[in-house]
Amino acid sequence: GQNIDQPTEMTATEGAIVQINCTYQTSGFNGLFWYQQHAGEAPTFLSYNVLDGLEEKGRFSSFLSRSKGYSYLLLKELQMKDSASYLCAVRDPNNAGNMLTFGGGTRLMVKP
Amino acid sequence: NAGVTQTPKFRVLKTGQSMTLLCAQDMNHEYMYWYRQDPGMGLRLIHYSVGEGTTAKGEVPDGYNVSRLKKQNFLLGLESAAPSQTSVYFCASSRGQGISFFGQGTRLTVV
């Protein structure tokens, strides 16, 4: 089966750095995605990792360790607009035709 | 620059009623998906399609049917709505198994 775990909620201060962790246990692995979802809106793509290491994209970075079944999303120089839910999703070739399985999401609250 | 469009955005149904949710994408994507999102449970895949005329079951298909008669449209049907189907429904599409683009969601309440 599929198991993807993320913290339910996190709080951080404007201007700070926050790390959102995601651990997964899947029978196969074919990539990990991070999506951002503001309240009442659609999820939007943030980053994709398929090989071990760090992918950097502006203020956002994502790290993957396949051997540990672990990823994190790093948000730097936090802004109020970063208050949102962050969804971790894994593509598993053994699951429903290589479809994505999502974790429950981490709701990040950025305070002044 | 529409992307993925879902209709309707909100709907209230009585138990036992039927309805169809429409998803349309203008990006010429082969893959389309229907998810439901419930508090604390993330997005769960209901059905998906890898091309026109094909559909397949996802993680939670019971109580739903789908059709993909045209490449740009993916319809989700509820034949006999139940309160357990109260949820926010998201449609998404992707080029192959790349990045998924999501619609704005349909908030469905079954009373």
Image (cartoon, coloured by chain):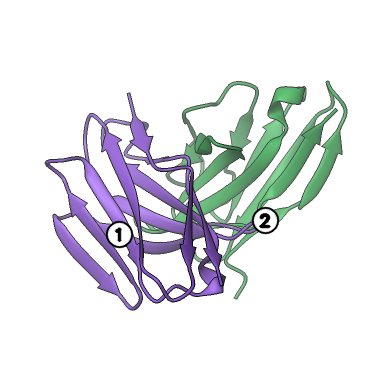
Chain colours: A purple, B green
Q: Is residue B5 left or right of residue B41?
A: right
Q: Mark 1 is on which residue type?
A: Tyr
Q: Which residue is mark 2?
A: A40
**Residue B109 visible in the displayed image:** yes
Mark closer to the observer (1, 2)? 2
Could you classify mark 1 by the number of other residues whose Cα lies within 10 Å: few (under 14), some (14-19), or many (20 or more)?
many
Please report, as a chain letter, where disc 2 is located. A
Residue at 20% x, 53% y: name it: A64
Write the residue at 47% across / 28% down.
B59
Residue labelled with disc 1:
A48
Residue type of the residue flagged with mark 2: Gly
Q: Left or right of B25: which side holds A73?
A: left
Q: In the picture, which quadrant includes the C terminus of chain A? A: bottom right
Tell which of A80 and A58 is nearer to you. Answer: A80
Q: Nearer the viewer, residue A31 or B41?
A: B41
What kind of element bears circle 1? strand
Quick check: marks 1 and 2 in contact, CB under 8 Å?
no
Q: Quadrant of residue A72?
A: bottom left
Residue A60, image x and y in percent? 34, 70
When the figure is inspected, residue A44 is found, relative to residue B42, above or below; the finding is below
